[in-house]
Image (cartoon, rainbow, N blue to C red):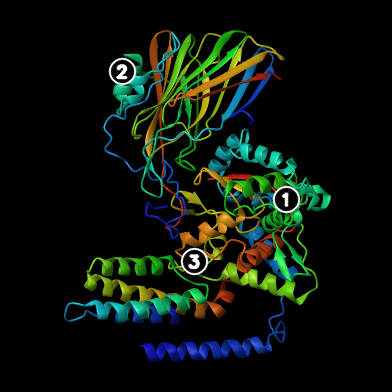
Amino acid sequence: MTTTTGAHPTRRLILQGAASVALLGLGNLAFAAPARAAANDKYPEEAFRQKGEADAIKALYGKTAEPSDKVKLDAPEIAENGGVVPISVTTTLDKVSSISFFVAENPFALAASYKIPDGTIPAVANRLKMAKTTKLTAIVEADGKLYSATKEVKVTVGGCGG
Amino acid sequence: MKARSALLLGSLSAALVAFALTSPRVIAADKVDPVADAKAFQNFFFQKFPNVTHEDFVNGPYSMNEDMKRQWQEKEEFPPYEFALDAGKEMFSTPFKNGKTYADCFPNGGIGIRQNYPYFDTKEGKVVTLELALNRCREANGEAPYSYVKDEMASLTAYMAFTSRGKPMDIKIPDDPRALAAFENGKRYFYTRRGQMNFSCASCHVQSPGERIRAETLAPALGILNAMPIYRSEWSGMGTTSRRFVTCNSQTRAVPLEPQSDEYRDVEYFLSYVANGLPISGPGARP
Amino acid sequence: MKRSLALAMLLAVSLAPSARAANEADYKAAYAAAEAASKEAAGMRNQWTVTVSTLAAAKKAADGGDFDRAVAASKEAEALARASIVQATSEKEAWKAMEIR
Amino acid sequence: MASSIRVRATANGDITEVQALIQHPMDTGLVKDSKGEVIPAHFIQQLKFECNGKDVFVADWGTAVSKDPYVKFSFKGAKKGDELKISWTDNKGASDATTAKIA
């Protein structure tokens, strides 16, 4: 659906973030971070503000990851819809403490980050928004080291024009 | 060149008419035969997609593409229409200001009856769809009608569809010339090209189901309404049959008609009738 | 085949260049013709969204005083409306060709 | 008003599988509505699952998580009948919480 208004200008046309993101020159969007944050699991404000994937990884973990086949990333080859892309990751690594997802082509690369206390299985399934065809990277922090897996997801709008 | 092709066309159509006159099936007017139409319609899809089980046609694009079917089944574990379903269930049991509820307006309290809609009302001489009946129930009980394309109507129809899940579509055409005319009018609408794109419903849903229009895979026309109402990721919200018809029109650059206008009610009547026997699978989740 | 011939002819007619700069009178005439065709198309319940948006663009251009663009847009709107009328009339019979029998 | 959190927690053996669907717009702040105004950012930032007094799963979310977000994970050390506490807070400071019994 192109971003021009349809036949009914009055109809409240909610343009989905994914299908036709109107990129605003907002520079760094100031997140209104809630003041209080639990002691150890503080919301990684800085990391979510980074545009590029490398900066986001550095801001979140402060180190770099190496690809590993022990991290199984599952995502569709062609996304049914950029607004709702089902993804999941599992790993055979042990002493996993955190799992994060990065969508390279999104306005802000870091999509989600999970803290995995011991006793919790190192696997997560989630639904993400992807602005356009992009590389999706999952990073697992195990025993202090970072391991990653990457997959490309094709994303385009649907419909025949309008 | 133009004169010659016009001549050619003229003679061709003359020949066609002659042939039609002599062919056995010709009857004075093109007699409307819904039973034959439904059989031909279903056989067309069963032959075009031999390895799609008959029931699977009601799953729209997912019957056409394995990868998308997997994505869909994953989502069905905890489907996005869950909220609309709960809201519908709650609304269905919340009494109107006059104390009555929707259950008083519908046979069997509105439970497990979606497969009989739309039906032909012989008193009114017109097709009555589930969405229309719900609004008429509201108005009869002094409540304001809901928009046909917004969430409340989708939640109500989602709950009613859910109570009919698995039941075969069971649309009846009474032996009443007006009912046959409504069926024929619906069929005509389905095959008529419109909009600057010059597409009819059939251009996409009969000629090229399984193929893509950009990212979307086209659903087969057979059973296309069995999953209504649907939660579409595209709208990231619920959509009724009315909303689907209106948006399809705009896609082909045709100005949509009023929701629940005769043409829409009749095409819903046609599409539901030819899907008789296929299970109700609403509410559905779609791209 | 017959239908696309009609469409092509119509569009060719509408693009004929006008010699001098258009004025409000030219616009009013062109707009009236376009509006009549558009109403006829709507009457046949076969209006196109592009006819509506082009008519609106013509009006907007005229309000802004740009009558050249307003006349051009009005002519295009009329052509689109005429095309949708041709479509509606020809489809009265043409739909049967696609019917599954 | 029913809670905005739908949870399904099923235990088989020592492993409990948890699925959650949360009703939330998850607006990115980068989208305009039909009148051309920006829809302000409004998204869940932190989602926490606790069981038997211990955090079993903490999610930090950005603007790229889908509307009406869904998440699935599993953890060990709980059994049928235990109570799972779920809570979220969003960037506007709003929050919601609910509890669910493990089936």
Q: Can residue B52 be seen in this view?
A: no
Q: Residue B35 occupies which quadrant of the picture?
A: bottom right
Taking depth in this image into account, of A132 and D5 the one nearest to the observer is D5
| Element class at badge 2 | helix
Chain for disc number 1? B
Residue under the point 30% across and 71% down: C73
Residue B279, numbered circle: 1
Task: Measure how far apart labels 2 and 3 are at the Cα level.
Answer: 51 Å
The numbered mark, 1 or 3, whose residue comes first in the sequence reads 3
Q: Quadrant of the N terminus of chain B?
A: bottom left
Number of residues whose C-alpha sits closer than 10 Å to that of mark 3, classed few (under 14), some (14–19) or many (20 or more): some
The reply to whether dot 2 and dot 3 touch (C-beta < 8 Å) is no
Disc 2: host chain: A
Q: Quadrant of residue D81?
A: top right
Picture coordinates of residue A62 (x, y %)?
31, 14
Residue type, label 3? Phe
Residue A139: image x %, image y %? 41, 20
Q: In this view, does A120 lie above or below A89?
A: above
Nearer-the-camera pick, B163 or B62 = B163
| Mark 1 element type | loop
Judging by the rendered image, the residue that carries numbered circle 3 is B199
Three-letter code, disc 2: Lys
Q: Can residue D63 be seen in this view?
A: yes
Q: x, y percentage for residue B78?
A: 61, 33
Work out how far the residue at label 1 is from the one at label 3, CA to CA, in angstroms: 28 Å
- Number of the label disc, if any, that sits on residue A58: 2
Q: Which residue lies furthest to the right in this view?
A: B108
Q: Is residue B244 left or right of residue B136?
A: left
- Identify which residue is drawn at 65% across, 53% down: B144
Residue B258 image offset from top left, x and y in percent: 56, 64
